[in-house]
Every structure is written in structure tokens, then in C-alpha cells.
Image (tube, rainbow, N blue to C red):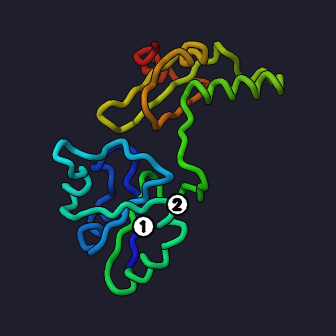
């Protein structure tokens, strides 16, 4: 049996219980490594946090393996249980032909403002309130609220990043936005 398991985006504890059960009964564990980025990884003793949790070694599935040698994994799955681990949602991605790049919040804002300038629809501008998120669910997550102009100047650090444009808000939401304002 081949199990395709999403690991979430935060840390090694984000796997579902069913996913963890499948990992525990699998004889081989592959982890996809070229379209996604782990926000957690190798511990001080050189063993990955996932290998420690699962008690089994991981096989890195790089681009070549995923695109050209997937049949080998499928043949193994006919003989014994195999788990293919994917950071995030395993069915929400797309096939990629280049190494992964990650859009920063600053780049997202620049692109949005460029589109607005071209279209001239007055949907948003540099003063529009937004919330920038980085590495949600991890130990070093970051949440900052501010105008597009303010968020452009914030160093959100390493990926993964998310930008939310704030619309009409409830008073409770306003309190949270105030809490995270830069």
C-alpha cells in the first residue's frame, strides 16, 4: 500500500493521527524534498526530527526520483507499506520544473501594487491594511499587521510567508489587528 501523507507546515507534530498510524506501519518512508521546504529539520545530533519521532530512517525523494523513478516506489508499495511524505497539503501542489522559490511578503505587495497601478480599479493602495504571516505554527512564527507600505519594510525572515488584505472587520478582529500592528 502507498500512503501519501501531508505533514502540515509548522513542525513535526502537525501530521494527522491517521497519517502517523500509516507512517508507523510503513516499512519505507520517503520525503518529497524539491517542491516544498521543511520549517523543521536536522537536530543537533544529525538525526532529523521526523526520524526521531517515527523511529525510522527517511529517504529523500528529490526531483529526479519524484519525476522519473516514481514507478520504483509504486512497485515497492505492491510488496509492502510505503509512505510518501509531503510538506503541507499533498494534493494542493503542482508539478514544478525549477527548484522551489518562495515569494516574500514584500514581493507580493510590490506585485499587487503594480497590478493596481496598471488596472486603476482603486481596490487597494499603499495605505491598505494587511497582515503578514511567516512560518505559522512554528516556534518562530511571525504575525505583523500594518499598511502595505509598512509591511514592505518588515523583515519576515525565512519562508513560508502569507499576506492577507484586511476587509471589513468586527470589533474583536480590530482588537487582534491592534495587537499585531507594527
Asked whether residue 55 is in view, the answer is: yes
Quick one: quadrant of the N terminus?
Answer: bottom left
Residue visible at 63% across and 17% down? 128
- Which disc is residue 177 wearing? none
Give above or below for 92 relative to 166.
below
**Going by the picture, which residue comes out furthest to the front?**
64
Q: Which residue is mark 1?
A: 4
Q: Which residue is mark 2?
A: 91
Residue visible at 70% across and 17% down? 125
Residue visible at 50% across and 64% down? 64
x then y, percent, for residue 174: 49, 18
Residue visible at 33% across and 55% down? 15
- Mark 1 falls on what kind of element? strand
Earlier in the chain: of badge 2 and badge 1, it is 1
Asked whether residue 172 is in view, the answer is: no
Q: Nearer the viewer, residue 5 or 100?
A: 100
Q: Is residue 165 left or right of residue 118?
A: left
Kindly check if marks 2 and 1 are in contact, taking CB atoms under 8 A apart as contact: yes
Q: Is residue 45 left or right of residue 100?
A: left
x then y, percent, for residue 98: 59, 51
Give above or below for 93 relative to 10.
below
Q: Nearer the viewer, residue 33 or 55?
A: 33
x then y, percent, for residue 123: 74, 24
Q: Is residue 53 left or right of residue 12?
A: left
Q: Crowding at label 2, few (<14), some or many (≥20) Cα neighbours within 10 Å? A: few
Give above or below for 48 relative to 58.
above
x then y, percent, for residue 155: 46, 20
Amino acid at each position: 500500500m502507498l500512503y501519501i501523507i501531508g505533514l502540515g507546515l509548522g513542525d513535526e507534530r502537525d501530521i494527522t493521527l491517521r497519517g502517523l498510524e500509516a507512517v508507523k506501519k510503513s516499512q519505507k518512508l520517503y520525503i518529497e524534498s524539491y517542491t516544498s521546504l521543511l520549517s523543521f529539520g536536522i537536530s543537533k545530533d544529525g538525526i532529523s526530527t521526523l526520524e526521531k519521532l517515527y523511529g525510522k530512517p527517511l529517504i529523500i525523494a528529490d526531483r529526479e526520483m519524484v519525476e522519473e523513478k516514481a514507478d520504483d516506489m509504486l512497485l515497492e508499495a505492491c510488496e509492502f507499506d510505503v509512505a510518501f511524505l509531503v510538506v503541507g497539503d499533498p494534493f494542493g501542489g503542482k508539478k514544478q520544473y525549477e527548484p522551489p522559490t518562495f515569494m516574500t511578503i514584500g514581493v507580493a505587495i510590490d506585485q499587487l501594487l503594480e497590478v493596481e497601478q496598471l488596472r486603476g480599479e482603486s481596490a487597494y493602495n499603499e495605505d491598505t491594511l494587511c497582515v503578514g504571516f511567516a512560518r505559522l505554527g512554528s516556534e518562530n512564527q511571525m504575525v505583523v499587521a500594518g499598511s502595505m507600505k509598512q509591511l514592505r519594510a518588515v523583515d519576515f525572515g525565512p519562508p513560508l510567508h502569507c499576506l492577507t488584505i484586511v476587509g471589513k472587520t468586527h470589533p474583536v478582529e480590530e482588537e487582534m489587528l491592534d495587537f499585531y500592528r507594527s
